[in-house]
Amino acid sequence: MRASVHVYNDESDVDALTGALTVRRGAPALISSGARADTIVVGAGIHGASTAWHLAQRGVNVVQLDRFPDGHGQGSSHGHLRMIRRAYPNPIWDDLVDRAYLAWAELSAAAGAPLLTTVGGLYARPAADGTPGLRGPGCETVTAERAARIFPGLSLGAEFAAVYDPAAGVLDAAAAMRSLRELGLAHGVDRRTGVLVEGWEPDGEGVVVRTADGVLRADRLVIAAGPWTGSLVPALAGLLTPTRIVNVHVGASDPARVSAPALGPFSVEVPGVGLLYGLPAFGGAAVKIGLDHGPVDDLGPQTPVTADEAARLLALARRFLPAADGDVVDSVACRYTMAPRNRFAVGALPGTPQVLVAAACSGHGFKFGPAIGAALADLVLGKERADLDFLAPAALGAPE
C-alpha cells in the first residue's frame, strides 16, 4: 500500500495524524504527546505490565509510563523468584487464587516457557498458637514430624505445626517481567520509561495525565504505581505504608538438600521475630529467605542490604535450614506497600470511574499479577467483576 500526506498546519497536526495511524500488523498506534490514547497505564511492575499486555492484545491503544528504566530495582517486582500458593487464611481469596494459577498458565503459553514450577509448600506456626493459620483447597495440617518427611531441608521443632500445600510453587519472576515487556511491545504497547507522572485530573469522561515531559489524554487511566500510588491517589495515601524488605540467598555445600523435592516454598511464624519466608534453591539461584516486615521506606534511592540485615537472616537460615551452610551469596532489597488487613485495592476509584487502581500488594501481590492484569482489562472495557468487590478501593478505606 502507498499513501501520502499533505500537511498545511503545524507540528501538532502531524502528531495527531501519526497518532491515528496503525504502524504495524494491525497493532494499536503509538500515541504522541498531546494525542489521546484509549488507556494510559502508570507503572510497569507486575500489575502494570500485565494490565498493559492484556489490554493491548484486546486491541486497546495503550500508553505505559514508568518513572524508572526497564530492569530497575527500585520497586517491588524485581528479583529472580517469587512464591505462589493456594494456602490463604481467608476463603475469600480462593477464587482469585484459582484465577492466578490459570493466568500464569496463559502467560507461560504466550511466553513459550514455563514460568510456574509446582513443588509444594509448607507454612508453619507455633503449635500452641490458637489463632487460625493458613488453609485452602487441597491443603492439610501436618505435624513437625510429617513436615520433616515432606521437606527434610526444613528443620521445624516439635513446637511447630504446619500446613502443607501441594500446589505451591516457584515463579520465575525475572522471566515473567521480561516476557510481559516483550509481549506488550509485540502487541503495540507504547512503553515509555524514565517518565515521571506528576498528577492527573478528570477530563469529562476521560482523564488528563501530567508528566514531566508533557500532557497526555486518555479515555481511561490505570494507576499501578506500587509504593508511589499514594502520591497519585491522595485518598489512599494514608492507608498505604511503603516498607523496606530485604532478602538474602544463602549457599549450600550440597545444593540438592535445599532444592526441590527436599525443600519448597515455606514460611515460619517465629516467636519474637516475625514471619520468616523462603524459596528453595532453584534455577541456579541459592536458597532465598526474608522477613515479611521492616522499617518504613522513605522512597529514596534503594540502598543495598546491610551487613546487620544479612547477618540476622543468615542466623535464621542456620536455625531452620541447616543444609544452607554457606555464606550469603546474593542479596536484594525491595519495597512492600502495606495496607489495612494485608489487602490490596483493585478497581475504579470512587467518583472517577474512568480511573482504576491496582495498589497496596501488602507483600503477596506478585502471584496475582497476570490475574489482576486481566481483571483490570475487563474493568477498563466495561465488564463487571463482582468477584473483586472485596478488593474495591472503597473497601480498603478510600472515601466514597
Image (spheres, grey):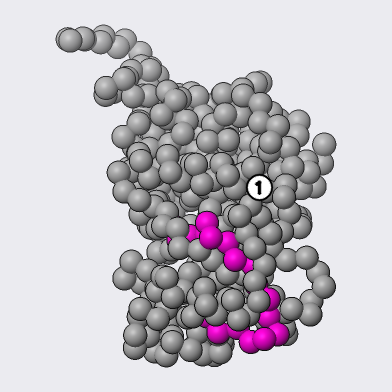
Quadrant, the C terminus: top right
Residue 147 location (% of width, % of height): 58, 76
Residue 157 among magenta residues: yes
Residue at the (60%, 72%) spot, across then down: 267
Q: Is residue 331 visible?
A: no
Using the rendered view, name the quadrant where residue 144 is placed.
bottom right
Tell me if residue 59 comes above or below residue 159 in the rendering.
Answer: above
Using the rendered view, name the quadrant where residue 376 is placed.
top right
Q: Which residues are magenta?
A: 154-171
Residue 271 among magenta residues: no
Q: Is residue 261 visible?
A: yes
Residue tagged 1: 94
Residue 263 location (% of width, % of height): 46, 74
Quadrant, the N terminus: top left
Residue 114 location (% of width, % of height): 35, 51
Q: Out of 133 and 353, give the one closest to the viewer.
A: 133
Using the rendered view, name the quadrant where residue 273 is placed.
bottom right
Q: Out of 23 and 383, give the one closest to the viewer.
A: 383
Residue at the (74%, 78%) spot, across then down: 127
The residue most toward the left is 2
Disc 1: CA contacts within 10 A as few (<14), some (14-19) or many (>=20): some
Tell me if residue 40 comes above or below residue 370 in the rendering.
Answer: above
Position of 292 with respect to 19 (left or right) is right
Q: Secondary structure at mark 1?
A: helix
Label 1 is placed on what type of residue?
Answer: Asp
Residue 304 location (% of width, % of height): 47, 77
Residue at the (65%, 21%) spot, across then down: 205
Residue at the (49%, 80%) spot, across then down: 152
Task: Say how many tags the image has.
Answer: 1
